[in-house]
Image (spheres, rainbow, N blue to C red):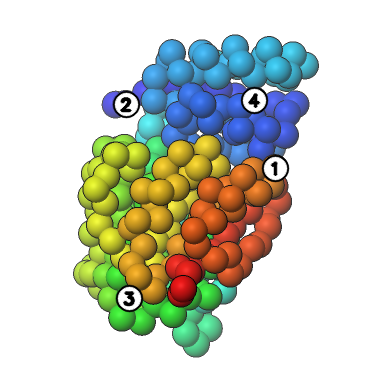
Amino acid sequence: MARYPALRVSGLDEGLALAVSDDYSPVAAQSSNDGYTIFFVTSAARDAAATAMASLFPQTSVESLEVDDEDWARRSQEGLPPITVGRVTIRPARGDGMTEASQQRPGAPGSLELVILPSMGFGTGHHATTRLCLAALQRQPLRGKDVLDLGTGSGVLALAACALGANRAMGVDSDPDAIASAIDNLGRHPHLDRVSFQLSDLTRGPLPRADLVVANLTGALLCRAADLIMNTVTERGSLVLSGVLQPEREIVISAFSRMVLTWLARKDEWVGLAFNRRTS
């Protein structure tokens, strides 16, 4: 069973903790009543993040942990309610089979439901950045369009794009565990047969092109990979970004200035952005 290095943090704003941790490649974050837990790929990355956090915020409580993946998923599901963004409802899977998507409870006319199993390839829809992306997807004309989800994690945004009418959706991630999680979640939705997932380094390319590109990453990574990301958008295509903290908003907008900002929304300390290609 895989074990993941983690930090349990309390006494510090979650957005600040995630911003400090960003340089050390965190792979997931889980909130709780007494703080939150941030997961890392290696113990070295976890320990470096702990040192940086303690140096910048010495009053913060930081505890190093080793967490079983199955235990993390189980505890993440305890008391975790469904969330609804517009037409889309996402509820955590029970983890006891692959038939849950066929057991959906009826909702409002036109509503859609996705079932996502929490795992280290995070993205159940509960995080503010995922909800911002779900809202942005529903502002886009998806019918007949190809969608590319960069940093797909659990695959929730690629699945949602297909459920909302996209012609095809591909999720790309550099983390093999995330791709395995996304494929598992795809198996829970056999009717969404126009979704695929691909293991790929987001910073090197080449990447497939699409009419709508969604990138829920981090502000720092978005800025570093801005040209590569913009080059994946087709001639009359659109781009949706999140994972951006409010203080990073202007620098990210500047990095994507080759495109036209068409939408901006804020949820908690996070920002979502949408762009279109310039027409002249």
Q: Nearer the viewer, residue 156 or 216?
A: 216
Mark 2 and mark 3 lie on one chain; the one further toward the N terminus is 2
Q: Amino acid at mark 2?
A: Ala
What residue did someone put label 1 on? 247
Mark 4 and mark 3 lie on one chain; the one further toward the N terminus is 4
User: What is the x, y in percent for residue 66?
Assistant: 45, 19
How far apart are the alpha carbons under marks 4 and 2? 22 Å
The numbered dot on residue 145 is 3
What residue did someone put label 4 on? 9
Residue under the point 32% across and 26% down: 2
User: What is the x, y in percent for residue 59?
Assistant: 77, 16
How far apart are the alpha carbons under marks 2 and 3? 38 Å
Secondary structure state at the residue bearing disc 1? helix
Q: Amino acid at mark 3?
A: Lys
The numbered dot on residue 2 is 2
How far apart are the alpha carbons under marks 1 and 3? 32 Å
Q: Which image quadrant for residue 71? A: top left
How far apart are the alpha carbons under marks 2 and 1? 35 Å
Q: Amino acid at mark 4?
A: Val
Secondary structure state at the residue bearing disc 3? loop
How far apart are the alpha carbons under marks 4 and 3? 42 Å
Mark 2 and mark 1 lie on one chain; the one further toward the N terminus is 2
Relative vertical location of residue 232 with respect to residue 15 in this rendering, above or below = below
How far apart are the alpha carbons under marks 1 and 4? 21 Å
